[in-house]
Image (spheres, helix red, strand yellow):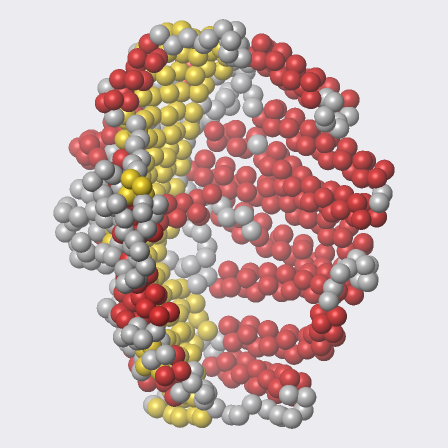
Amino acid sequence: MKTHYFYSIPCFALTCALAACSDDNKSSSAKAGQDAAGLTPASSLDPSAPVASDLVAKRAERLGIAALFPMDMGIVAGVYDVPGMIRSVQNLNMVKTWGSCSAGEDADESIAIPGEDAPKPVRKKCSVNTPVIDAMIGFGPEWAPWMDSAQSAFTGMGLHQMKGILSGYKLYQDLINGNKKASDAEVEVMGNRYTEMLIKWIDLVDMRPSQAATAPVMVAAKLTPEALAQAKATLKDAKLPEGMELHGIVSLYDKTYNGLACKVAEVDCKKLRAKLEERLEEAKAQITVSQENLDRLKAALKRLDESKLYVAVAFVDDTLVGFITTNPEKQVRLAASPQDSVLARPDFSMADAQLQYPAYGLIFADKACAKGLINLDIAYYKGMFSGLKDLMQTVGTDWKIADLAPSMAALDSMKGRLLGLYEKVAQNATPVSYYAWQDQGVHVEACTYPLEFYLLDAPSSMNSVRPGADTVLYSSFRINPQIVDMGCTLYENIAQIGWDYGNAYISNPKHDVSDQIRMVAPMLQMARPTIEELWKAYKTALSGLTDSGVFIMDMQGAPSPTLKNVPAPRFSAAYEVKNRAALGEAWQKVSDAAKTIVTLASQGKMPELPSPKSSVEGDVTTYDYECPLGADLNPVVSVSDTRWAISMPKAFGMEVVKESMKAPGQVAPLEFQLNLVPVRDALKSAAEGNKDIRKAVETLDVITSDVTGVHATGRKGADGRDVYHIHVISAAK
């Protein structure tokens, strides 16, 4: 499934983390590993209140380049201190150890992996220089209506992608069947299809100034003194050489718009059309497209005769600003003051508590643009599912699936569920804000529309279980039951489609399938009822649990000779119970299914698995499953009227269950922690005499000298938005 654009933006933290982990953190007062999420203002400030001028001034002092962008910008995205990030990355121990070059002239000639006896590799010195200090791009408010108008094109894109796969399949079949006539016809179909898609996109790129939805782009880059001087000198007397292809199409001149003195490049769109048509005529011999579509393409290009396109560039102190626009008189403009800029929007409140720290980046999208992007996703998926249905019907018929109805119904169910989720997200769209800063590592905070996956309105009832200094993995959460239900349905749908098409592929004599796989297929057919019963048991168990759960793992178990004396991991996944009877019913289904599986697998030699040992402590019953690796590696299941947990070993599981029954704390509803240091230290205790473990320790030594882990939280803001905080924790230097 295609991930929505904004969902992936927190990954920006990982890039920025590398840029921060080598900082000395002299400005930081926080303790290592401390999450600043509880101090951020999204939950304490009134998002509807006007922003005080003195606060805007503080934002502008730290986020200066953003103060150039007018308040009505639909989207802005920027990065800060690019040279500093580059230097910091080059100074990371990971880069020094495993990189191909040193950070600069004063860096060591070579660096070897710690502990290795091999000769040090010779590494060349290199440095990366950038003329840009800060950079930002902005999209005007006209982009929101443009995205609304682009939905049909995105539907077409999703549809044509699936049709392209179908055409590829048909071409392959024609190739192996030696049907050249059909192959040539399919190539022509593909050519016309892509031409039709191109026409749709040309229709969207409407550069006529008369159109209200012309969508401008603004960029700004704070330059180094050397780059600034060079840019000014280059633009002062800029000319297009006569031999350049754009000569005669693009004209350069000076003009002032809204008080901003600009160097302007104006595109003669009529001459551009003539050039494009010339190229189109040259390409006719190489492309297979109908004359009708060629005429449609030329007609779409003819609109260029009425179009305008300008690129305007200017300087504001040490900052280069540029605009791509069809209407420079209206759209080439700067914010008159910070109070008139995007920084005066309440959506930037998440940055206010962090303005004393170095900024790394920010992203903002207003409600209209955020909703527009979600609707583009919806449009894309509508086309994709429509095309996928055609693809599956064609392939299913070719593979001789006797009854396509179950797979088609499964596909329709997937479409309904996924589009329903996206439509709900679109209905609840809000402005979206991201901010990244450095404070003992990198922090990224995202304030976004409700994403529906987790419940963030109240803390988990299980959060009394807290991570400690030795905790490796920790998660406390409240998962949305509707998402769980949707996930189960999607798995069932995928399984149905996989089953129908997998069996058809294996049984089709035309397909190259090994004898072993053909032998396994009947066994899977026999096992299907049992697998379905296990799935029903899983869903029954889910119905017996609430939305609250916790997972915790450390490396404090007893060393095991089987595991080369590495301290064994201890873990527990615990959940709140709402219906113990449902858990009992689920377990009975699992037991019955296990008997069938064991009987089939052992060919009747073993009627059932050995029963687990049970014990009772208070109102908690624990079932111990013996493991040949040792008692400390025995998985146990603990259950009471209020708690269910799977753990290893028993003592740790009981400790977690008891702790979970305490009153929940006032902490974030969603919390995640990864700590690499305990893993490194646990492996060190067993590294002597074991080369593989020693190499793992050496690798972790390098990594943890830069980054020790990640801490993330999620909560609900006062304005109803989801607030996610990610802290990539740097090692103490």
**Residue 386 placed where, x, y %?**
68, 46
Could you tell me residue 545's position as x and y percent? 46, 73
Residue, x 72% and y 61% (percent of image)?
501
Residue sitting at 69 percent across and 28 percent down? 195
Residue 409 to residue 86: above or below: below
In the depicted view, which residue is nearer to us: 684 or 100?
100
The residue lying at 27 percent from left, 60 percent from top is: 114
Q: Is residue 209 left or right of residue 674?
A: right
Residue at 81 percent of width and 45 percent of height: 174
**On screen, residue 31 above or below 103:** below
In the figure, is residue 481 to the left or right of 61? right
Extreme residue toward the front, this view:
119
Using residue 622 as the reference point, say whether residue 211 is left or right of it.
Answer: right
- Residue 689 percent across, percent down from the top left: 31, 75
Q: Say how many tags the image has.
A: 0
Quarter of the picture containing the C terminus is bottom left
Quarter of the image for residue 170 reads top right
Is residue 85 something that shows in the picture? no
Q: Would you say residue 506 is visible in this rendering?
A: yes
Q: Nearer the viewer, residue 718 or 61?
A: 61
Residue in the foreground of this view, choosing between 590 and 482: 590
Residue 540 appears at what percent x and percent y?
55, 75
- 267 versus 70 height, above or below: above
Q: Dividing the picture into quarters, in which one does residue 408 lie?
A: bottom right
